[in-house]
Every structure is written in C-alpha cells, then in structure tokens.
Image: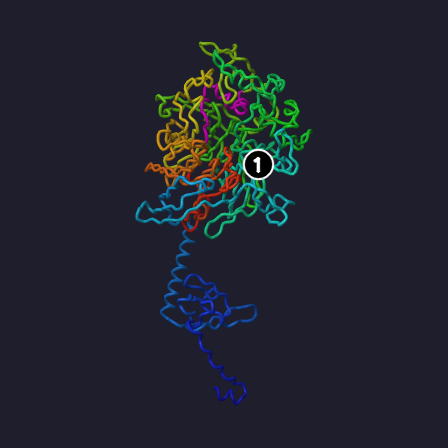
Amino acid sequence: RRARKRRRGVYTPRRPRRARPQGRRPNESRAGFPSCARSQATVQVGPGLGWCGQVYHCLGSAGGGCRAQKKTRSTGEKTVRHTMAQPIALRRMYTGLALAVLLDVAVLLLLLSGAMGLEAPKPTSMEFNPLHIPKTDPPKHHTRASSKARLCFNGDKTNCKTVPLSYEPILRSGQEVPCVAPDSRLAVRETETCEEVFGLVKDENGTHIKTTDYAGKAQPGSYEVSSNPDFSSLLKVGNKVFSVVQFEYPRPGVMYATELRKDRAGRLSPKRMESVDWSHEGGLWIPCAGSVSPWQTHIGGEEYEPDAKYYSPKFYPNDTSICGASRGVCTSIICEPDEIQLPVQNWKTCSELRDAYEFAKYFSSSPNGSLYPGEVKNITTLRSMFNPYRYGYTFEVKVNPDGSTEAKKWFAVGRRSTELAYILPDNKTMYLSDDGTNSMLNMFVADAPMDFSSGNLYAAKFKQHTDGSKGGEFTIDWIPLGHANETEIRDAAHKLRFSDIFDMAKPTVREEGVSCPEGFQSVNTGTAGLECLKVLPGMDTIASRLETRRYAALKGATTEFSKLEGLTFDSKSHRIFAAVSDLKDGMEDQKENGKYDAGGPNDIKIGYKMCGCVYALDLDESNMAVNMYPFLCGDTENNVDDKNRCNTNSVANPDNVAMMSDFETLLVAEDTKFHENNFLWAYHIPSGSLQRIFSAPYGAEVTSPYYYEIDGYGYILVVAQHPYEWNDYALSTSSSGKAGTVGYIGPIPLRQYNVKARDQSSGR
C-alpha cells in the first residue's frame, strides 16, 4: 500500500516518534490529567476518574488513558469522526470503567429515590462538642461556636461520623449588599449602582432616617443603622433560599429580605437585598421574636404595644396629665415613692409616650412632615400623626420567587406585646406569648387552614397546685374571647379611640382590698397596672382584639406573667416549651405591697427566680394546652462569681427557644446580665445533657435560635444582637465592633438532597 501511494506521489513519510518525557505515562497531559485532545472533546476530571466528552470514560492520572473506540457525532450537516487514544493499562481501565458505572448507578438511584419521595439516610442523633467558657479577654469579644458535632444513624451509636462546625456570619449591621433594581421592586437583576445597607432605618417613603442628638433633633449627614437584628428566618422559595430579618430597635422598626447564595459545601452568603415595605400598615412597631409558618413564610410580632388610653383626650387632655400616669396609682395604704412621683414632661423621660415620639420620624407624608422627637410640639401634634391601634399585632411576610415581598398584619388574632407567635402543624392553631409585666398567654384557632383573617381567640386561666418554691405546677383552662374577622377589626383600629371602647374610673384602695364604682371591674395588666374599666355597649368584639389583655383580665384570665418570652413546639412529645425570663413581680405573691396583684385574681404565687425557667405545656388531642410545669431552670447555687451571678453551667434568663425535634434537642438562647457572655444551649431531652454551643460578644443578647434543613444541610441560625450594649468594652483593642450579626452554626452535612426547608420543631 505504501509503494502504490509512493508511485502516485501521495505518500507522506511518518514523523519520527518523540521521546516521552520522563515520569509521564502515555496519553497523560503535562498537568498530570488524562489527555483526550485527539478526540477534541471536553475533559472534566474528577478524583481518579473523568469523562471524554459525554460518552467516553477516561481514567484519571492513576489510570492511564481512554478506551480504544471510534464514535461519530453529528454536527449539523457534517459528521466528525473521533479517534480515541489507545489503552495503556487494561486492568486499570476496566477498574475505572467499573467505578464509573457504579457512580452512575448510585446517582441514578438517588435521583429515582428523590422522584419517588424517598430520602437518603439521615442522622437520628446529634451530639455537640461542648463550648468552654472563655477565660481570657479576646474570646469574650467574639462570636464562638462548638467545633464539631457527632452524627449517628439509625439509632446505632457505632454508625456515627464527626463533622466540623463553626459560626458562619451571613450579614452584619451596616453591610452593603446589591439591591433589587431601583426602577422596579419586582426586578431580579443585580446592579452595580444600587446597594442596600443592612439595618438602615427608613421612613414610609424609603428615605433614610437620620440619627438624633440628645435634644431629639436630626443630625445632618448621620443616618440610623440598627445593631439590633432579632428574628431572622431562612425560607426555601422554589429553588432559592431567602433570609428575612427584623430589627427590634430603634423606632420605627425595619426589615430586610435577602436572597442567599448557597455553594456546594452548603455555605450561605448574601446575593441581593431589599427592605420590606410596611407603609401600607403605618409602619412596623418593635418587631421582636418570630417563627416560620408551615408554608414557609416569616411570622413575627410587635411587642410593647403603645398604651392607647393616653391618646384619648377624654381621659388625658395634655402631656402633663400623661407623663408619670403609669406610676400614679397607689396600690397600697402606704404609697411607695415611685408611685407618687411628679409627672415628667420631657419626651425622653416620659415613658408613656417616648417610643411614639421617636416613631414620628416615620411619617414623612404627614401634614407636619417627618418630625424628629424634639420637633413634636406636644401630644396634640403626636395624636394627629400616630394611631396606637395600628400597632401590637402578629404579622406575616411572604417572599415571592422573584424576591419581592408581601407584608401584612393579622388584626383578627388580637393585640398585645407579642413576643412570638407559633403556628402548629395543623395550620390553624397558633400560640402567642405576651412579653412584659403582668402579661398573658393566648391561643388562636383559625376558621380555615393557612388563613388567619378570622377565627376564635382564647386566653389562659392558670390554677396552681404546688407551693411554688420550684416554679409552680399548674393546670390550664381556656377562656373564650370570641370570634372576629379581619375586616371589622382593621376598620375599627383605624377609626376608634380607647374612649370609644371603654369607660374608665378611679379605683379605691383600702386595707380590705380594691373597689370600683358600680358597673366597673378592677384589672391589673401590663404597665397600666390597676384600673377600673367597663366595656361600652356593643364593643366586646372590638375590645377583645384591640385591647386583648385588658379584655382577657375582665373575663377572668390570668395576666400575671413576667417576661413571658419565646415559644416552640415539639412534635415528638406533643408539647410546647415556653421561656419565662424572670420569675418575679406578678408571678410572686403580693410583691411590693400587692402592686402587681391588687385588683386581680392573684392566680400565680411562686418564689422569685432571677435566672428564669423554661416551662413545658402538654397538649391534648385538640392542641389545647392542659398544664404547665418547670422543665429547665437556672440557679444561683453553683458555679457563680462576681461576673456570673447565675450558674455558668446552666441557663440564665432564657429568652427564646427552638426545637430540633428529630434529634430531641431543645435550643435555649439567653438574654441576661447574670452571665458575662450570653450563650446558646442545646438540651438533649432524653439524656438530660445540657451543652453550651454558642457564645456572643460582651453585652450581646443571643436571639433567633432556629433549626433548618435545606437541600441536605442543617443550619442552627443564631443572632448576636447589640454587642457592648451595657458596657464600655467596645473600646478594647480586642473589640469585634458594635454591629449585630446574623449567622448560623454549620453547615451540617446530613444527606445528599432535600427538596424543601424543614422546621424541625414541627417535623415540617
């Protein structure tokens, strides 16, 4: 054949073969990867095995080459023939092919199991490496977390793996993040010229609010950025992950929704962000703790609702009659000094109106424009801008796949100092905690699942069965407060004043007790304390929703809790856990000459516990709590010193709680001054093991504990709020700064995939 070609003049002599460089196998590239250049196909190299194009298996650097095959591929009208490199080591080649086939089969099985709704094996227990108390100064200035967790499968303690952990910040106060394009709230593209500042406070038109000086005047060029992020949710919306964060302070409240990136290792980072618009609801008032609904929306609450009676000219015509009024009722024959002090007229020290004066900055479109506290002349001006009945509600924020948000308040659920609202897996029953002094516990049952625009509201009546030395044990009756719907309550909230709902009279305090004029009934609630009230004719339904605590007390409910904080639900034991940060005041028996019990039923009589307790409430088949008893309490007896007045190996002033139901573990976050640093604890219920898993910087409160599972990874979300709030350690060279931080402990690898985020507290 070569001779014939030579005679025709078409024979080209073969090039001499070049010597192969020392140390490199045949068909191996200079980088040490398999060479598929002759096939002109893309090479993607994995650990020990790769692909030549999409059909040819190619061995890795340990293998030596590609299969000897010829394949054709159609590229338009022309057919291109690919000639692959010859095999070098058949045994290695076949081993690589077998591994590739096995990998293909494994991936196929995973995909099929996902399509059929089956889940890969996941851990049944999780044990944390305990976090030690910082002994030296630098660690006390920083966020710290457990270094590892031990995951066991199928209840087998011999089938376990250890995974590394760390605290991974997502966002910090003042951080700039690309925003949704300014020409449309529904736009999804990122821009280089548009950025949001995380925590920047805005008015109703989206204008940045300036900081104020001591006199309450705006400081030019200085804008308010909050260091108080509180509840922060992770929401799985379609194939995207969002975080919604609410800021507790200053006034007005502000919220941000952020789309997050998730890399292959499960780490989360901000992609784009925009503030949540509350202008249609008159703004947001002190958003505190929250939860995630079973249908993946953000649920929050407005705490420390403004007392509406001070905005009724009938009872309080001017500032002089208001400031100091909350301390002006003598509840004993011998009045204490703080109950008879003279009224204070300075807006900054007038506790009854101070928050509303600060909130006036929000109303830039009012006739007076956006007024800073020092510019509001008096209560008459404030009343023209501010309606207290628009605030104090549970609210929901829905994030759409394009990143836009829909925010609304639930008026039919009632008005209170809502710390946390938690919706049970039936999608209809909601429990609500009421933060502050002389507060209550509520339950709301919606008429239809996932729709809280109408339903029945209840208030708890507690009956004590022990002496209270260890926190007391109680049975619970539920007092119905009636049915209401969104339309009627929302309309009333925009039109009515306190004097349209109640008549009020002055109580008489004698040695034998409290009395009210005929037709009036005494109550002792919230910061208002002792009052004589009468519901005006036809106003019961309105009173039950706009003045829920007062109305519940008139119906005989218990309004004696002190700092009733977060709630969570354990699906395995079918009970609720509730944090009571301080067992004091109304929970004690006749504290301060009966100041907190005068005029009320005095249902709770327990001993003072400065370190607080987490209580458990068992639910019946209809999801109604039937009892309450102490579950986990702090103490002052062991492991204390001058900087840690509560036991450092136990909880102090539990603030919010969350369940990891699959792992039977309760998360407990602290808000205390009785530990030098605030901690997040993990309490394994079956074993009784309590482990410290997170430490916040000096002065920072630990908020927003919540466990999520997203796409095969677990995240324990935790927030360090207002670092250095109550000390001057921020000036230290070890300081980590005053910015609040939203982050998570993790990511914890659980399985290969997960189609939606799961809130482990309810198994959803």
Q: Is 699 above or below relative to 496?
A: below
Give the image's coloring scheme.
rainbow
Q: Quadrant of the C terminus?
A: top left
Q: Amino acid at mark 1?
A: Val
Q: Which residues are magenta?
A: 540-565
Instruction: Tell me if mark 1 has few (under 14), some (14-19) or many (20+) residues whose alpha carbon lies within 10 angstroms of its own.
Output: many
Residue 331 drawn at (x, y percent): 49, 14
Q: Closest to the observer: 278 or 693?
A: 693
Q: Residue 545 colored magenta?
A: yes
Q: Residue at x 40, y 26 (%)?
A: 609
Q: Nearer the viewer, residue 257 or 487?
A: 257
511 vs 226, left or right, is: left
Q: Position of residue 42 (x, y in %)?
A: 50, 65
Say left or right for 416 vs 206. left
Using the rendered view, name the quadrant where residue 22 is placed: bottom left
Residue topped by disc 1: 254
Residue 408 locus on image (x, y percent): 56, 34
Q: Is residue 269 placed above or below 700 in the rendered structure?
A: below
- Asked whether 320 falls inside the magenta stretch, the response is no
User: Where is residue 282, by image quadrant?
Assistant: top right
Residue 618, visible in the rendered structure: no
Looking at this view, is 210 or 526 the one in front?
A: 210
**Residue reaching furthest to the right:** 367
- Does residue 391 appear in this view? yes
Give the x, y percent position of residue 507: 52, 12
Does 82 appear above or below 461?
Answer: below
Q: Residue at x 59, y 42 (%)?
A: 197
